[in-house]
Structure formats: structure tokens, C-alpha cells
Image (cartoon, rainbow, N blue to C red):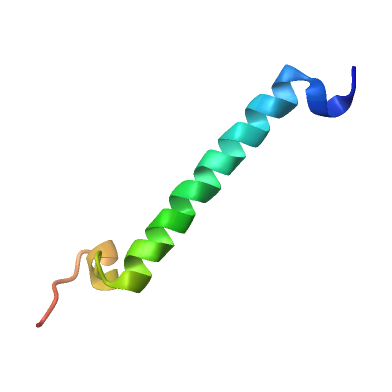
Amino acid sequence: MTYFAKPNFVRNAANIATALFAVFIGVQLLAAGVFPVSMLWGGRQRW
């Protein structure tokens, strides 16, 4: 059995991939302006 076939490695890789996917989606929303950057630290949009 290789290292990549071990259940622990597969589970960790899936968790890392899920976290990176969530970060990527968040960055895309910020870049598109759907979620204003100032809302991240509790600010308000002026326009």
C-alpha cells in the first residue's frame, strides 16, 4: 500500500482542498465586488 492510498492522507488532502476552495471562492467574491472588502473588518460602504 502506497503512502497516497492511506486513508489518513486522503482525508487530509480532501480537507486541504476544501479549505483552499473556500478561500478561492472568497477571493473571487471580493474581486468581483459581490462582497465589499471593507465589510471584512466591520466597515460600511460609503457609496
Residue at image position (32%, 71%) is 32
Query: Where is 27 relative to 38, above or below?
Result: above
- In the drawing, does residue 24 fall left or right of residue 13? left
In the image, what residue occupies the spot 58% across and 42% down?
A: 17
Nearer the observer, 40 or 8: 8
Q: Give the position of the N terminus as an image quadrant.
A: top right
In front of the other: 1 or 40: 1
Place of residue 7 in the rendered image (x, y in percent of width and height, measured from the top left)? 72, 18
Where's residue 45, x and y in %?
Answer: 14, 76
Viewed as shown, does residue 42 lie left or right of 22?
left
Q: Quadrant of the C terminus?
A: bottom left
Task: Name the residue rendered at 25%, 64% in the picture.
Answer: 35
Which residue sits furthest bottom?
Answer: 47
Q: Residue furthest left?
A: 47
Position of residue 42 relative to residue 31, above or below, is above
Picture mark count: 0
Q: Position of residue 39 (x, y in %)?
A: 22, 65
Q: Is residue 40 left or right of residue 15?
A: left
Q: Quadrant of residue 26?
A: bottom left
Question: Considering only vertical position in the picture, is 9 above or below 35?
Answer: above
- Image side of residue 13 versus residue 43, left or right: right
Q: Residue furthest right?
A: 1
Q: Which residue is rendered at x = 60% and y = 40% of the image?
A: 16
